[in-house]
Amino acid sequence: MTSTLIASTSVAGQRPRLAVIWASFGPYHLARIRALAKYFDVEAIQLAGFERLYRWGAETDEQQASIHTLCDGAWEDQDPISVAFRLWRKLNKLQPRVLLVPGYTTAPARAAGLWGRLHGVRTLLMSESNADDHRRRWWTEAAKRRLVKSLFGGAVVGGKRAREYMEFLGLGGAIVATGYDAVDNDFFSHGADQARRSGRPAALSNSYFLYVGRMAPEKNLDTLIEGFAAYRKIGGAWSLMLVGDGPLSAKLREKAVRLGCSDSVWFAGHKNAAELVPYYAHAGCFVLPSIREPWGLVVNEAMAAGLPVIVSSRCGCADDLVEDDANGFLVNPEDISALGALLSRVSAMPQSTLAAMGKRSREIVGKYSPEKFASEVRRIAGGQN
């Protein structure tokens, strides 16, 4: 178990101490921690050193918080009960007055919620779940309602769908805030602008649609490649850039070969946040075709970089981030022909139209920032448990 003290601009004792918990820290979390540090003395607790599911590294030397790592190694290798006990002891030591808990399904999350309730702490649930992201059964939903209402005094959720689901689970009104799903907009906006001024790298010289994320079944990349192959067969000239890695990588490469479009489908592999910026900067349009996606933070990134977007109607962010025909388009992720038609429509648009859509993307995503997340936490943390 390790603790890393990161310089804070606050004076101890003058502001409420807030503990925020995640399984492991990545760029999304650290941007939110920086924003929280404007209002709270932040103690950031990661349950393990990293997660195999996500291949990010947390660069903590610029953060304004105390970073506590409860267990070395991967989160997937830890005994949840043992981690829950370690978390309880850490909270006993830190004695926060506000507690942010990620979800309610794991033993550590439930332990944190119970600790907060027993100690009279303002305990807030962080969630991006919505009613459509998994199959729901009435008896498990009934149990969730009892659990959520007993452990938490409020919640910070992603957007409209997550708010509706939280209301179903028994938390609603002023104690539920949106804005949880945010990225460092300035990082992607300024980085993309700088990359565009620097000119196109040779590897990104052609116009292309961009996907960023894991190559896993729920991302629906089979359908994307099929729709793209149909688009190329009717004369489409753009390429398809797939950035990421995952269990389906080899099969997707084989599929591109089988469909005769492998010469225009590029597999860039995993990239960290800094390496992603040029891909966003020089893309013509971003595409997220998931059949299951609680939110889709890569859409935030693409919009901050100034891109039009094509987003599956199943994504949790669809209602909040996509204005049809203004900054992008929604698509049924199972409709290959509709996806191919949208690819054709977008690639035929004048550059001025694409630029206007990208500008609108930035305007919309500007309302979903780490600063907004932190201000909403501050607002609902002011209530009584």
Image (spheres, rainbow, N blue to C red):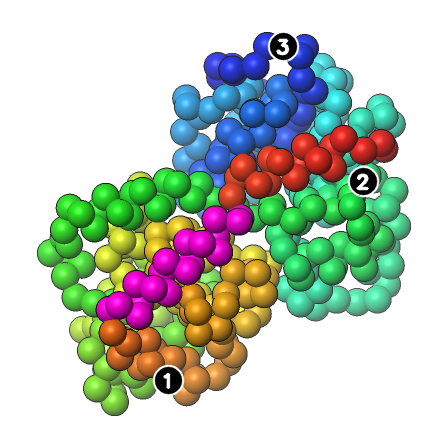
Residue 163 placement (x, y as % from top left): 71, 56
What residue is disc 1 on? 341
Residue at (85%, 31%) from the top-left corner?
A: 384
Alpha carbons under labels 3 and 2: distance apart: 26 Å
What residue is disc 2 on? 152
Residue 76 placement (x, y as % from top left): 56, 42
Residue 260 placement (x, y as % from top left): 23, 82
Task: Give 72 or 9, whichever is nearer the viewer.
Answer: 9
Q: Which amino acid type corresponds to the residue marked 2 in the rendered image?
A: Phe
Q: Looking at the rendering, which quadrant does residue 287 occupy?
A: bottom left
Residue 293 sits above or below residue 187 on the image: below
Residue 67 placement (x, y as % from top left): 54, 22
The numbered mark at residue 12 is: 3
Task: Give 119 or 299, whichever is nearer the viewer.
Answer: 299
Relative horizontal placement of residue 144, taking residue 13 as reference (left or right) = right
Q: Which residues are magenta?
A: 351-368
Q: Which amino acid type corresponds to the residue marked 1 in the rendered image?
A: Ala
Relative horizontal placement of residue 382, taking residue 62 as reference (left or right) = right
Relative horizontal placement of residue 279, taking residue 77 as reference (left or right) = left
Question: Does any portion of residue 262 appear in the rendered image?
Answer: no
Question: Does any portion of residue 184 appear in the rendered image?
Answer: yes
